[in-house]
Image (cartoon, rainbow, N blue to C red):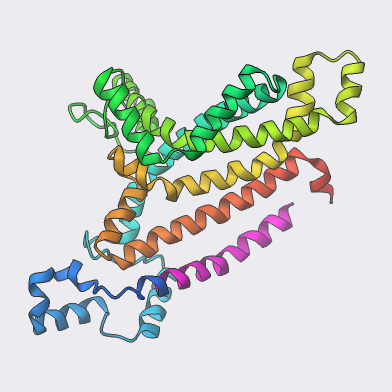
């Protein structure tokens, strides 16, 4: 396992280079001029200003030269400077990534716990009312657009009922906890600020549930199908014949084996949510990398767009590696083989 993990880690830079190359080429295939975001439309007719801006940002060089310079800077940890914010892209990503990780972890917690629970009980009560209700809920979660469900839950639970706060991460009237991890709930907990912790958790509930609902639908359906397949195996019949309780059969024997194919979906979903939370972050005014990507795409901010792409590629590669390692721990036969 150690040698396998090392080989995978050593291959990641080459895979990320491929991601960077594709993102770089795609970002420069657009016909719109990124100088518009740098100097504004009014200055585009001023030849001297345009020439100075092109020289300042290296846009007067050929595409291969720009690519070579960009990759060379990446090796030193320089992601470039954002056309829009005029700050290093790495600083922008570092400031926004904790908010996205916080939202993604909360959404995965909701989606995994509820999805696995629904899948197990749906398989146990197969073709009964609970099974039909669970499958219907999973279907809605997988089918409803995030922007629609996000607006609906905001209107119902925040505007009409007033049970939960609206968009944002924390009430503007509350002092922000000292920056330690960048995740407000963790920072408030470490600082011992109970009021900020409660408010940050309240702001986290709606976006986490909306984002986790789609994941929950996929996980619950896969767990149900895997559980039904496992419950028909001979060793389940043997366990029941030996007098094992229904709870032991479901959790210790069936669920453990049924979770092996589910690990793939969980790992993929975590990586997807990090970069796929664009609509959720936009609706709930969540200052993560999803909203950062939208703002950058609107203004053709090439360095920022490529930076977000690198983060997404790294997230998928790491999630794939962690999933493979989790396979080995869940099934010893994989580790031995």
Position of residue 299 relative to residue 162, above or below, is below
- Can you tell which quarter of the image residue 45 is in? bottom left
Location of residue 261 by image quarter: top right
Side of 148 where 256 appears, left or right: right
Does 185 appear above or below 305?
above
Q: Which residues are magenta?
A: 1-24
Q: Is residue 10 left or right of residue 176?
A: right
Q: Pinpoint residue 256: horizontal percent, then vertical percent.
A: 74, 31
Residue 31 vs 113, above or below: the answer is below
Q: Residue at x 52, y 70 (%)?
A: 18
Furthest residue in direction bottom, as rendered? 62
Observer-nearest of 169 and 217? 217
30, 145: nearer the viewer: 145
Q: Residue at x 51, y 70 (%)?
A: 17
- Residue 249: give x, y in percent of width and height: 79, 21
Residue drawn at (58%, 63%), measured in percent from left and top? 12
Q: Position of residue 281 (x, y in %)?
A: 34, 42
Q: Does residue 4 appear left or right of residue 23 in this picture? A: right
- Magenta stretch containing residue 19, yes or no? yes
- The answer to whether residue 54 shows anywhere in this view is yes
């Amino acid at each position: 396992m150690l040698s396998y993990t090392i080989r995978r880690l050593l291959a990641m830079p080459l895979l990320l280079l491929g991601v960077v190359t594709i993102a770089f080429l795609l970002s420069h295939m657009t016909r719109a001029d990124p100088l518009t975001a740098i100097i504004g439309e009014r200055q585009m007719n001023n030849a001297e200003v345009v020439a100075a801006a092109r020289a300042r940002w290296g846009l007067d060089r050929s595409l291969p030269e720009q690519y070579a310079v960009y990759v060379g800077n990446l090796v030193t940890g320089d992601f470039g400077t954002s056309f829009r914010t005029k700050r290093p892209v790495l600083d922008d990503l570092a400031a926004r990534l904790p908010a996205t990780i916080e939202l993604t972890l909360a959404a995965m917690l909701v989606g995994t716990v509820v999805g696995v629970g629904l899948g197990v009980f749906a398989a146990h009560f197969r073709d009964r009312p609970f099974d039909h209700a669970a499958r219907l809920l999973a279907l809605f979660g997988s089918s409803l657009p995030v922007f629609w469900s996000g607006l609906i839950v905001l209107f119902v639970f925040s505007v009409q009922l007033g049970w939960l706060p609206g968009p944002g991460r924390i009430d503007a009237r509350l002092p922000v906890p000292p920056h330690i991890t960048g995740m407000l709930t963790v920072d408030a907990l470490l600082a011992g600020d109970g009021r900020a912790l409660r408010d940050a958790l309240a702001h986290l509930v709606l976006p986490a549930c909306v984002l986790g609902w789609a994941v929950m639908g996929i996980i619950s359906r896969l767990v149900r199908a895997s559980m039904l397949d496992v419950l028909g195996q001979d060793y389940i019949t043997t366990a029941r014949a030996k007098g094992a309780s229904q709870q032991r059969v479901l959790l210790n024997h069936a669920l453990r084996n049924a979770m092996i194919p589910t690990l793939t979906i969980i790992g993929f979903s975590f990586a997807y949510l990090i970069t796929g939370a664009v609509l959720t972050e936009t609706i709930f005014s969540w200052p993560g990398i999803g909203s950062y990507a939208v703002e950058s795409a609107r203004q053709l901010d090439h360095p920022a767009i490529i930076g977000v792409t690198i983060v997404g590629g790294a997230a998928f590669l790491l999630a794939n590696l962690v999933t493979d390692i989790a396979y080995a721990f869940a099934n010893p036969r994989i580790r031995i083989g």
